[in-house]
Amino acid sequence: MILTLSSRRKLITVAIGFFAGLILLIELYPIGITLLNGFRRDIVILSGQGFSFDQITGRSYEMVFANRQYMAGLWNSVVVGLLSTALSVSFGAMAAYGISRFRFAGRNVLAYSFLVFRMLPQMSLVVALYMMFRAIGLRDTIWGITLAHTSFNAPYVIWLLIPFFITVDRAFEEAAMIDGCSRWKTFLLVFVPLARPGLVVAAVFSFINSWNEFLYALILTGVRAKTAPVAVSGMIGGEVLTWGQMCAASSIMLAPVFIFTLWMQKYLIRGISVGGVKG
């Protein structure tokens, strides 16, 4: 049987849709299980019983919201995420602007060094950071864990924003300079607005990276600056496994990321497409 061109296109579209739906189902399955188990009791989860509507209860959420350590960790995650995102995007944008618009010796080496630094495993750096922060009094502080998160977010932001700044026409820059703008004003008034989609993408991914980070938060914090992922792991007791509370706490952590991502969705799509095509 010989398929026409239109039939082939329809078949390819159906196949792509099927595999995309399958991948989406695989990705959403653990999230669905987490959301579901947050409304079930621990004994029901551990027994392996099938789901039924009479199992639904809000007890786990009540206990999580009454858990002061978790709520403090959740607040710390919000503060650290916002601060590290602001620092990473601010300094990363300035560094990307300098690398993309100025010619100097070692420019390409410097650009690739940020990518290499981002690829280093966190375990190879966390011990040195622990010793340094302990020596200068930044261990178990909000600013300490913020700087640690900025250290792995900033290289990612720089590498992401370089293509956006490179594609800005020099005519805009020259016009601003002729009008009397300094380099700083040119950066703020010309490049920042034109690179806004890239800045939004960098901000979203920086926040998500900081929000989900566990290793640095585990080793570099103690009690005062503990973040939400560490607080959730602390719910694993030696004798009792509070799966319901862990799932409820994890579900609460999903909410800010989903809301933030949906809010920035149009900027994300535009930024990723512009960076992918023009970068």
Image (spheres, grey):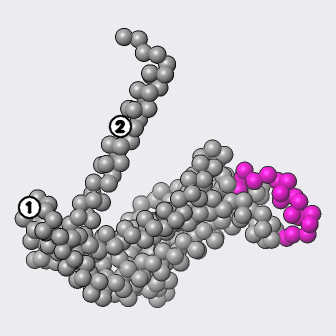
Q: Nearer the viewer, residue 12 or 152?
A: 12
Q: Which residue does the numbered mark 2 point to in the structure image?
A: 18
Type of amino acid under label 1: Gln
The image quadrant of residue 35 is bottom left
Q: Is residue 94 visible?
A: yes
Q: Horizontal and vertical percent for residue 210?
A: 45, 70
Q: Residue furthest front?
A: 53
Magenta-span inclusion, residue 34 = no
Type of amino acid under label 2: Phe
> Is 24 positioned to the left or the right of 196 in the image?
left
Secondary element under disc 2, as helix, strand or loop, is helix
Q: What residue appears at the point 66 percent right and 52 percent down from the top-left corner?
A: 163
Q: Nearer the viewer, residue 179 or 93?
A: 179
Q: What residue appears at the point 56 percent right and 53 percent down from the top-left corner?
A: 269
Q: What residue appears at the point 35 percent right and 43 percent down from the top-left corner?
A: 21
Magenta-span inclusion, residue 170 = yes
> Is 106 positioned to the left or the right of 229 in the image?
right
Q: Taking 76 as reference, is 257 above or below it? A: above
> Which secondary structure type mostly characterizes the magenta part of the structure?
helix
Q: CA distance from mark 1 to mark 2?
A: 31 Å
Q: Which span is picked out in magenta?
A: 165-182
Q: Quadrant of the N terminus?
A: top left
Q: Horizontal and vertical percent for residue 45?
A: 13, 66
Q: Horizontal and vertical percent for residue 80?
A: 47, 78
Q: Which residue does the numbered mark 1 point to in the structure image?
A: 49
Q: Taking 279 as reference, is 72 above or below it? A: below
Q: Horizontal and vertical percent for residue 274?
A: 63, 49
Q: Taking 114 as reference, is 127 above or below it? A: below
Mark 1 Cα shell of 10 Å, populated few (<14), some (14-19), many (≥20)? few
The image quadrant of residue 115 is bottom right
